[in-house]
Structure formats: structure tokens, C-alpha cells
Amino acid sequence: MRKRARRKRTRYLEDEKRHEPTGEGSVARSADQRLGAFYSAGPVMSLQETREDETQAQISQPGPVAQGEGTREHVTVFNNPGSLRLEGRTDADFDGGSFRTERTRVRPASTCEGCTGGDCVHVTGVLVATYHVTTRVTLPSVADYPDLTPCQQGRVQDAIDNVLSPHEQDHVDAFRGYNGTTRRPFDLTLCRSEFDSAIRAMFEAEEDARRQAAQDASDALDPFHFDVDLNCED
């Protein structure tokens, strides 16, 4: 509202100025006649209005500019806060086994499908199969965690030796269930040309079941995670 009032007074003074006489002698008199005693005494400002104006001026002034950089920090995050999750790995290579027949006896037969005469035979014997698996265990190393304190390194090494390594050994034992030699008697009546494929089918069925049993025993041990408590002081 004060701003609008000033504009009105300015227009009034400009209108009056266009009608006042010209010349140096008339300047003081015409000004006094125009403004009267109150305005002649000089401008009057409210203390409250001055303080508000000063406050507004202070608020509108641009503030100081602060700038800089923070402290750099490298953080290694493990699976759980304050702990380290250790995991091992065991690889197994199944050799697929090998087989042979022993004590094989062949006799003529007459009830074969697909062949007659001397091609139809009755065969007995023993199927001998041998299986072997090779395992390889990979364990973490304390050197994999260079930021650990000596106390923390001790805890990690203890966990590797006494918790993680025994668990991976359980995997090794499970896979080793594949190892061994089996002896299975067979008694077949078939065409002579089918003998090899029939024996191989028996062997492959046994090998598949043996491999799956070893894999299932290993799978039953997982999931397994071990978290090492790193909250310790040297």
C-alpha cells in the first residue's frame, strides 16, 4: 500500500510543477506554497517502516558461497553387516564307468522276437562295472580379504579350517558314493546281434542311477552358508 501511495504523490507533484512560475526567485516560494509546513520541514520516516525495509534488504542480499569436497572412503560390503559369508566349492568329474562281462554262457533258444534258428540265444553271465569320480575342493583364503584386521583374519581362518572345509569334505564323501565296482548277474534270451546293446543298456541304467544318487546326496547338503562374526578387537 505504501508503494501505491508514493506513486500518487509523485503524479500530484508533477502536475503542480507544470503550473508553477519559472525563474530563480520563485523556486523557494512556490515550493513552500506547494508542500506546506509539514513537507517543508523535510521527509518523515517511520522507525518501524525503516526496520522492516532494512530487514527486507538483508534478506534479499546474496549469501556467502560455501564449497569443498568430502573425505573419500572405500567401503567393502559383505553379505551381512559385521560378518563375512564364506562359501566353498566342490567340483566332481564322473568318469562314466566301464564294464565287462564275465562267465558268459550261450545256449540255443527258440522264443526270440525278430530272429530264429541259431540267431536266437539264451545268454547268462555277470556284468562287472567299475566307477570312479574325481573331486576338487576350492576354499576361500584369508588373503582374499586384505582389509581384515589380524583378529578378524584369525576368525576367518578358523572358520575355513573348522567349519567350511569339513562341509566341503561332506560333499566329497557324497560324490565318492559313485566310486566302486558292481557285479550283476544277467540272464537274457535275445537275438545274438542284440547282446552288446542289451548289456550296454543295463550298464547305462546302473551308471545313471549311481551318478544321480551321488548328486542327490551332495545336493542335500546345501544350501550352506557360514557367516563369520568380525566384531572383534586385536
Image (cartoon, grey):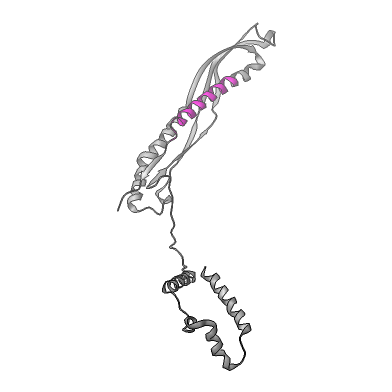
Q: Find residue 33 and report its horizontal and vertical position in percent.
A: 54, 85
Image location (x, y in percent) of residue 202? 57, 19
Image coords of residue 231 (percent x, y) = 33, 48
Residue 224 sits inside the magenta stretch = no
Residue located 47% across and 81% down the image: 38
Q: Is residue 136 left or right of residue 160?
A: right
- 26 above or below 130? below
Q: Position of residue 188 (x, y in %)?
A: 59, 12
Between 68 and 191, the one lying in front of the other is 68
Task: Identify which residue is drawn at 46% across, 65% down.
Answer: 69
- Judge left or right: residue 118 versus residue 127: right
Q: Residue at 57% of width from left, 90% of height from top?
A: 27
The residue stretch that appears in magenta: 201-223
Q: Is residue 234 left or right of residue 160?
A: left
Judge whether residue 49 can be spotted in this image.
yes
Towards the viewer: 16 or 109: 16
Specify whether residue 208 is painted magenta. Answer: yes
Tell which of 211 and 13 is nearer to you: 13
